[in-house]
Image (spheres, rainbow, N blue to C red):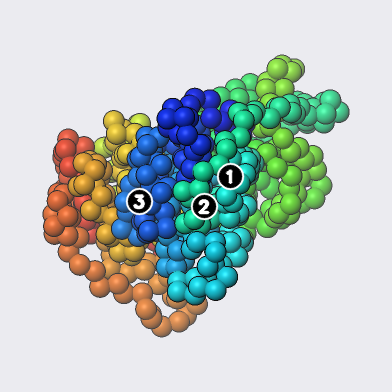
Amino acid sequence: MLTSRLIYMTYMSRPSRAQEREEVPKTAEIIAAALKEQGVQYAYGIPGGEVLELLDAFRNVGIRFVLTKQELGAGMMADATYQLTGTPGVLVATLGPGITNTTTAVAQAFLDRSAVAVLTGEIATPIGAVYTHQIIDHESLLRPIVKWTTTVRAKGAYEQVRKGLAIAAAPMPGPVHFNLPTDVAPAEQADGRPHAPAVVPTAPAPETLTQVIEWLGQAKRPLALVGLGVQLDDACGELRQFLEQWRVPAVMTYKAKGAVPEDHPLVIGATGLSPVVDKLHMAQIAESDLVLTIGFDPVELRADWMAPWKEDKRTIGIDLVPNTHHVFRSRIEYAGGIAGFLRALNGAGTRRLPERWPQPELDEYRDSIRNAVVQKPARGLGPYLVASTLREVFPRDTIATIDTGSHRILINHVWQCYEPRRLLQSNGLGSMGYALPAAIAAKLNFPDRPVLAMMGEAGLDMVIGELALLKEHKLAVTLVVFRDDTLSLIKLKQERMKLPETGVVTGNPDYALLARAYGGNGVVANDTNALAQAARDALASDTFTLIEARIDPAEYRQQM
């Protein structure tokens, strides 16, 4: 299990810099060494005087600090780093506006299930009760959106850090907050001893396994709804074997895309936020005689997923944690290792299965999902053509990121994924401003992979200063802006509510020119030929390329 590897890794397995010089380590060095032992390579943020000891400790252990333009971008980079690598993301911020700027990024990690260590500088302990300039209660501010928050002490820091990192990685993963006062960071204190807690194995009860196998053996139209939990438990191989062995088609949430390659004949497509697509899935769920939810987290779903099936339907829920959300309930619910449960099912063998899911029906179901979003304007570019053209040009191993907006819902049903964790987005929180910072983190961590960021103008505007990092760090990322000069999703909602158009026209700059000002390539595309050529050129370029795709947003009305 990915989560288990993170939780139970032995800390401090090699001498720290302080140990090599035969000195008692500083608190900041203890924190840096613990993060390094977890595999951390990058920390992101904006420093103040309160975190300088920490930055120096990072430098000494070999963690590279990436200076960003705003804490929002830094937090999105930390989130993407965890999603891509499984190692904790690290966000560094100072006090005052430094920590207040982090809140959206921390909420992103919380709702999108990302283990992120949030490190904030704090005023010196002796004056903390009296001094007021830039002072707010850091722990109280972040407590609702982190799994755990603590102010690091001048004694026992090792245990605090070890506990926090274990909490961050435990199901469901999420952010933890370490508040570091300026007088504690340089304070010398003893390391804790290396320690690896015992792993407690979990397995389904025999009677549960027997019942699930019986239902699987009887079902003629089983359907699996697969979510992010499968990737968090590193259970993608077991999932694929299960689908093939029991002939169960699967529908993936947006962030689970690629858990099994999307060109696999048993993968139907994605679900989550499209009313048009979800209506088709709901019809199939109603006809299914067995529904399995496997790591299927409702944080990714629209409100229409509330109670999506009748109580008497045979339903099985398999997840890392107990069902406390009650968005949907299953007649059999198992909380524990997803990979272990699937291995038990796969090891049980299969009896002679009833005839289920004739291939023509399965193909018709899959085609209905893909055709639901197909729109081709008579001339020019529409968002579907942009997304489908990019998928044709970019290699299978591309890491893609998407910003929030109408285009994101569409892209999730057009862009096929062939590996897990290769389409990054803010889906639990749904924050704009995600795609560019996530693409920066992707290219830093995987410099040899093609990286593509797809965004609307409004999302880019929120983090536009981070473009400077692409040139600074020599990151040949491709950025595609779906430009329609409108907040299309909000405009569509206004139309359906019969409200006048208000506050949705963005009035944007020349993005291609702006990209060139930041040291990259800037191109405008008005048709598919120009877009495809610009994308091929971008893949061959040694610097970043921004493609401004001028689109007609009218087709969103049919896709939403």
Q: State the residue at coordinates (79%, 39%).
A: 332
Report, in whole angstroms, how far the alpha carbon at label 1 lies from the one at label 2: 9 Å
Amino acid carrying label 3: it is Pro
Report, in whole angstroms, how far the alpha carbon at label 3 lies from the one at label 2: 31 Å
Q: Left or right: where does residue 529 sit relative to residue 78? A: left
Amino acid carrying label 2: it is Val
Q: Can you identify the residue that label 1 sits on?
A: 157
Q: Position of residue 209 (x, y in %)?
A: 79, 27
Name which quarter of the figure residue 515 lies in.
Answer: bottom left
Nearest the eye: 347 or 179: 179
- Which secondary structure lies at badge 1? helix
- Residue 437 shows which numbered tag? 3
- Which secondary structure lies at badge 3? helix
In the rendered structure, which disc, 3 or 2, sits on the residue that comes first in sequence? 2
Circles 1 and 2 in contact, beta carbons < 8 Å: yes
Nearest the eye: 464 or 525: 464
Q: Can you identify the residue that label 2 sits on?
A: 184
- Which secondary structure lies at badge 2? loop
Circle 3 residues within 10 Å: few <14, some 14–19, many ≥20: many
Circle 1 residues within 10 Å: few <14, some 14–19, many ≥20: many
In the rendered structure, which disc, 3 or 1, sits on the residue that comes first in sequence? 1
